[in-house]
Amino acid sequence: MEIKKNIQVNTKNSLYDNFINRLYLSYINIKQNKIFIYNFISIFIKTVLFILLISSDKAVSIGTNMVFHSVPPILVYISFISLILSFAFLFKGIYHLCSFLILNTFISAIYLADIWYYRSNHSFLSYHMLKATSNLNNLGDSVLAMGRAIDILFFIDIIVLIILIIKHKKIYENTKVNITSFLILFILPILYLSYVHYKVDILKKGYENVILFKSSWSQNQTMASLTPIGYHIFDLYRYYDECQPYKLNNSEKKEINNWFEKKEEVLPDNKYKALFKGKNLIVLQVESLENFVIDKKVNGQEITPTLNRLLKSSLYFNNYIEQTYNGTTSDAEFISNTSLYPVRSGSTFFRYPDNTYKSSLPNIMKSLGYNTLAVHPDKGSYWNWLPSLKSIGFDNCYDSSCFNIDEVIGLGLSDSSFLKQLSSLIEKQKKPFYSFSITLTSHSPFNLPKEYEELKLDNSLNGSRLGGYFQCVKYTDKQIGIFLDNLDKSGILNNSVVVIYGDHEGVHKFFKDEVDSMKNKESWWTDNNLRVPLIVYSKGLNGETISTIGGQVDFLPTISYLMGADPSQYNLSSIGRNLLNTKKDYAVTSTREYIGNDSTDKDFFLKGIDLSDKIIRSNYFQK
Ligand code: GP9
Ligand code: MN
């Protein structure tokens, strides 16, 4: 009996010893694995570099204005790097080495993709964007233009790694699969991350000002707390969560209703009410058109002679702020036609193409007896615009398949050809109509074919990105002039109002760093501050400049007021306000910046961004 007991104890002891022994050996194995240590250190350095880069304005240099708000959670960084590298221990021999190379290159590629996306959109990639791959058509040049010399730093270590692998491959030839090392590097980080999540996010102890696995108002903060590796792992969870149908509870519904009621300004009507009643409404959203070029000359030549001429008979809003987010062009279409901010993750058109909005601009126009059409020179699948604009309320949608693609510049059909074909299409429309279109040619990277360049630029501008931008805008401006002349010849212009606005910034959105670093620059070149022009033109009108600060969410109430819709049709469903009858002077940007003189109601107006997100996700305004 005694002997049996001893044997049992000994077996238990030896099992335990065995386990400890294996752990210890694996620990030594990890510690002595020089290629592992090298990859660990190089990914750590690249992670810190990434976080420092996104702390500068356009991720083009090392910045410190964000990361040092709080102590960086270094152990969290270490955990995520360890999680990723653990997989290499599931492979033996040369495959073990190759898996380090693949994992490290994969990490650099993700970091770079995030940085490039950040440079143009001030946000990071998300799984929702996998739905938007149809957008990559003809976009190669625009994407490549986001690269900067500093990006090489993400790949130098990989070249060194290849050399190390070639040099030391003999030593690793007999490496075996090491499940214990894998488990140590995989499970320990998970245990630590669970613990730190509980401590920081739930108990709110530990790192000050740090949020880990919780949506923060700024994606930069999530990146700095979790590293891009952690950000994408967390984004996967969020993606799953956000794909579930969103049902508002009663208190959320109440909050939304109260917000709209509080936002409403009840003011006496003014001269703008129904100013364009019964006229056709022709809206042209111009790619990357910024406000700073309006009424400006470069080397003695007007950049936008057509638009400048139109101002004499237009209401010109010169403090109109773009509010697009992950859906860029499509967001501008969405915001203008619904008076809601886009969703906070991914593109609204890709995520919610079937949403309906009973008080959308096309629906309001239809209630006034209008025929509605949306026309694009690109494919209906681009940004998923065709199904989305149909759901928003446009009865007729025409995409590139309805046009003769006889001239392609950059992304697609040239503005010259498109606008000519558009004027013929418009002439055939049943009156009154609301037509909504976009242009393409002035898209980044602003390389207009030489034969179309009309501006004579001096050496400082010629060949520069800004010079290219001026040439593109000048080209599009000219095509708009021809478009309006055609509408005039057919007599349509006499009974129409033409609304022209920029979808988002252009040269300052993608290449602000290049503009800022130009030599001999004129002060107005750097002065755009998210403004896009909004021009409401009608033949014979007395031109006026309206300097009220507003944004694209204000489009629907402002245009509806001018077209004669009753404010009760849109007041309690528009996040924006009528810029022609308001006492407020503000706009909020998609990155939650408040632009305005009186910031008393700042938090209230910023709340509109989150309420829009809930409204869209729950299809709150469905017909
Ligand atoms: C095509 C084009 C896209 O729809 O306007 O522009 P982007 O969204 O890249 O600005
Ligand atoms: Mn665009």
Image (cartoon, grey):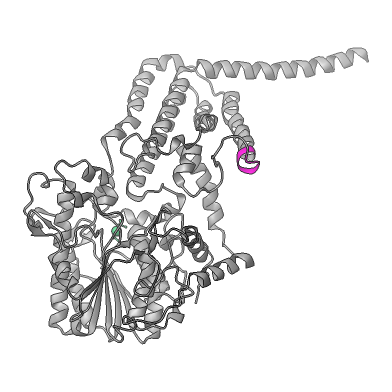
Q: What stretch of residues is rendered in magenta? A: 199-204
Q: Quadrant of residue 4?
A: top right
Front-most of residues 545 and 367:
545
Residue 239 lies, in percent from the top left, at: 51, 52
Residue 329: give x, y in percent of width and height: 32, 60
Looking at this view, is 387 or 479 the one in front?
479
Apparent side of residue 196 relative to residue 462 in the rendered image (left or right): right
Ligand 1 image-quadrant field? bottom left
Q: Is residue 257 above or below residue 208?
A: below
Q: Per the image, is 202 magenta? A: yes
**Residue 318 at x, y percent in the picture:** 27, 64
Residue 328 at x, y percent in the picture: 34, 57
Q: From the viewer's perspective, is 529 left or right of 14?
A: left
Q: Is residue 154 magenta?
A: no
Q: Residue at x 47, y 73 (%)?
A: 264
Front-most of residues 321 and 50: 321
Q: For the point 55% across and 42% down, which residue is it?
A: 211
Q: Residue at x 32, y 27 (%)?
A: 156
Residue 234 seen in the current view: yes
Give the answer, above or below, for where 68 lies relative to 527.
Answer: above
- Residue 81 in the image: above or below residue 236: above
Could you tell me what secondary structure mostly forms the magenta stretch?
A: helix
